[in-house]
Amino acid sequence: MSKLWTGRFTKETNELVEKLTASISFDQKLANEDIEGSLAHVQMLAECAIITNEEGEQLKEGLLKVKEKLAAGELSYDVSDEDIHMNIERLLTEEIGPVGGKVHTGRSRNDQVATDMHLYLKNRTKEIIELVASVQGAIVEQAEANVETMIPGYTHLQRAQPVSFGHHLLAYFWMLERDKQRLEDSLKRVDMLPLGAGALAGTTFPIDRKRTAELLGFEDVYPNSMDAVSDRDFILEFLSDASILMMHISRLSEEMVIWSSQEFNFIELDDSFCTGSSIMPQKKNPDVPELLRAKTGRVYGNLMSLLTVLKGLPLAYNKDMQEDKEGMFDTVETLEGSLKMLAPLIETMTVNDTAMKQAVSEDYSNATDIADYLVNKGMPFREAHEVIGQIVLYAIDNEKYLLDLSLDEYKKFSTYFEDDIYTVLAPESVVNERNSYGGTSPKQVREQLKLAKQSLDA
């Protein structure tokens, strides 16, 4: 099939130009969406008497045959047809003859490609939301099993205060919950139909855009034809949401790498999610979380790439916009692959509660509780803070932990100290006393788990 625009030209397209401008190597991923959009378009054309009912049926039958061949992997694309739209039209014409050319009545490739991407992203965003929920389910399962397991909580990667390991894990649940909410909200902008905008100014044919939207399951149509063909905000928003989601995945992956190291030994990752060394037989490398951490960079790159492509474009469509697809496809595939890997990685990890308990018992992370203890006895907090600083320094100099100090040693720093200081300093007490809403006490963590489950069931 000759190119639609060859009538204006006296020379064949340079072979290098043809290769540069063709997008079929990657936009063939939109084949199903392109056919779905065409099916709705031809039905609307027939209903509006722009084509005859007989032509509409012929086009529908031909498109369905092409769709069957697509499902069977039998379609063959040609780079000379430039993109998925012209390839599908050629394949359709091969099926039903010249009437196949009427499929393009009342539309342009500009509104057609935008429609394909809206359909694609609408479907894939919903799938990604479900995958995020599966990771959340794995987190809830591990958190529920470790409500009373204690782990050092860190600030500045220095031990700060002991916390419930379940509480720590649930922090990621809520990060992912916000990611889900962002993706769900972005669907409002994805759920807009560009088809019918034409190249940029609409069409002279008496089309019914709202009918096409109804057939394709779109909530609304773009009210401005120029905006409809040039808008890529919905892709940028998806890439932005995806970047934040990948950042959260990366943070959790980083913790898994740290926790599974010999220095920490807080968790052990399942053998099926690790690899070994070609030279050091003792090694068990956390390659999966390391790669999840690394893949964040490519998602960030896809966002920055499209922002840069779009930043200087005048209205309406420009060929630059052909660069909008590969990053979107790559981000979708990266997210789906990462989330599918992360859920079982969390589910199968083994928690070393003994090592965690030892860690919270052999540090000074209970120091804040001594300050609270003195405040409750009547000492001003700032004075208490200074006293505890002196006690910690004394303990370090004498190679002791706070629970190792005798009552006489404590009384050197304040007469407020009594035998009950040892109950206050016990790691279990430190965790249990953080009973404010959202705190790390087992009671609050169990309440948090209820909220998390309710959120997943909603």
Image (cartoon, rainbow, N blue to C red):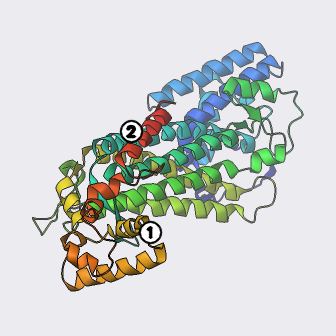
Q: Residue at x 64, y 51 (%)?
A: 237
Horizontally, residue 368 falls left or right of residue 262, namely right
Mark 1 neighbour density, 10 Å: few (under 14) some (14–19) many (20 or more): few
Front position in the image: 139 or 229: 139
Residue that mark 1 sits on: 378
Q: Say which amino acid is labelled 2.
A: Gly
Q: Say which amino acid is labelled 1.
A: Gly
Horizontally, residue 44 falls left or right of residue 64, namely right
Q: In the rendering, at what x and y percent does residue 255 appear?
A: 34, 61
Looking at the picture, does residue 120 appear above or below residue 384? above
Mark 2 neighbour density, 10 Å: few (under 14) some (14–19) many (20 or more): some
Circles 1 and 2: CB distance less than 8 Å? Answer: no
Horizontally, residue 13 falls left or right of residue 341, namely right
Q: Which mark is residue 27?
A: none
Front position in the image: 360 or 335: 360
Q: In the rendering, at what x and y percent does residue 318 appear?
A: 74, 56
Q: Residue at x 62, y 48 (%)?
A: 82
Pick out the residue farthest to the top: 54
Looking at the picture, does residue 35 appear above or below residue 306? above
Horizontally, residue 308 falls left or right of residue 45, namely left
Front position in the image: 323 or 144: 144
Residue that mark 2 sits on: 137
Q: In the rendering, at what x and y percent does residue 210 appear?
A: 79, 27
Q: Residue at x 60, y 38 (%)?
A: 122
